[in-house]
Image (cartoon, rainbow, N blue to C red):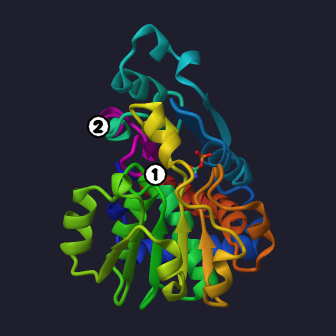
Amino acid sequence: MRHLINILDLSKEEIDELIDVANDIIANPEKYNEACKHKIMATLFFEPSTRTRLSFESAMLSLGGEVLGFSEAASSSAAKGESVSDTARTVSCYSDIIAMRHPKEGAPYVASLVSEVPVINAGDGGHNHPTQTLTDLLTIKREKGHFENLTVGFCGDLKFGRTVHSLISALSRYSGIKIVLISPEELKVPSYVKNGVIKANNMPYVQTTDLESVIGDLDVLYMTRVQRERFFNEEDYLRLKDSYILTPKKLENAKPDLAILHPLPRVNEISVEVDKDPRACYFKQVRNGRYIRMALILKLLKEANA
Ligand code: CP
């Protein structure tokens, strides 16, 4: 049974195929209207979500399938103490594919060990978020035309930002990528990303606390939210939450073809005035999330039924 737990579960070629299918869905949506007729997706969200859960549901409905699930642990038997493993095993009896978000790192992997149907990691704690990465890759491909030789800046909470960890892993497979890590000292990327991915793949990188000093070098700027829910104390969160606020003024020295991405939700880190800038791609990114998830559901269901 094929699952998607980590973005590296997909080969580079498979990611290219998913991007091609997503682009075909965007161009010819009617071709896919009934592709998943009589199939059921379960969305098991033990943690809040707007984009990921609803884009999965929208994706499955757009493919002619059905959806069931829950949007908080409190409305499932997890509230009575049921394990992730038993929940997944149960729900796999009612559905053809499962998307799971959980605050604990590794929970979707545990689910995949017992599930009779494909499990998709829809975000596990501060660890990984592979379908956000597919969304980010589709957006970069549509905006820049390619992945090679891009200078990609990651700004904000690089410690807890699971979307950052997954995207850096995915980009490590392309040539000529330069990584610029912009964060407060306390929110630097974890060593498993810095040593295990960036250094292990000989990716050129710089680390700084100053966004304005590097903004002119970037082809892609990936802004992130400081993640209140992962902090152990509120004081630290309040001190760090507004470390970076992207404004039109700060963009004056940026390249004219910079692509500004953000997985969203944003709190304060991109001023709403930036939304009018043609370089702001984060709402296009939201839209792309639905199409790449359609492509992923098609692929995993096809392989499960082969
Ligand atoms: N990007 C993302 O995961 O958003 P949600 O938390 O709203 O799903």
Q: Nearer the viewer, residue 177 or 215?
A: 215
Q: Is residue 172 visible?
A: yes
Q: Nearer the viewer, residue 235 or 101?
A: 235
Q: At 23% across and 57% down in the image, what residue appears?
A: 192
Q: Which mark is residue 113?
A: 2
- Pointer 1 residue: 305
Q: At 71% across and 68% down in the image, what residue appears?
A: 284
Q: Secondary structure at mark 2?
A: helix
Q: Is residue 211 located in the magenta-colored stretch of the structure?
A: no
- Amino acid type assigned to the residue bearing label 2 in the image: Leu
What is the magenta range? Answer: 110-129
Q: Is residue 247 left or right of residue 20?
A: right
Where 22 falls versus 51 (above or below)?
below
Where 43 falls versus 140 (above or below)?
above
Mark 2 crowdedness (10 Å alpha carbons): few <14, some 14-19, many ≥20: some
Q: At 53% across and 81% down in the image, what residue appears?
A: 215
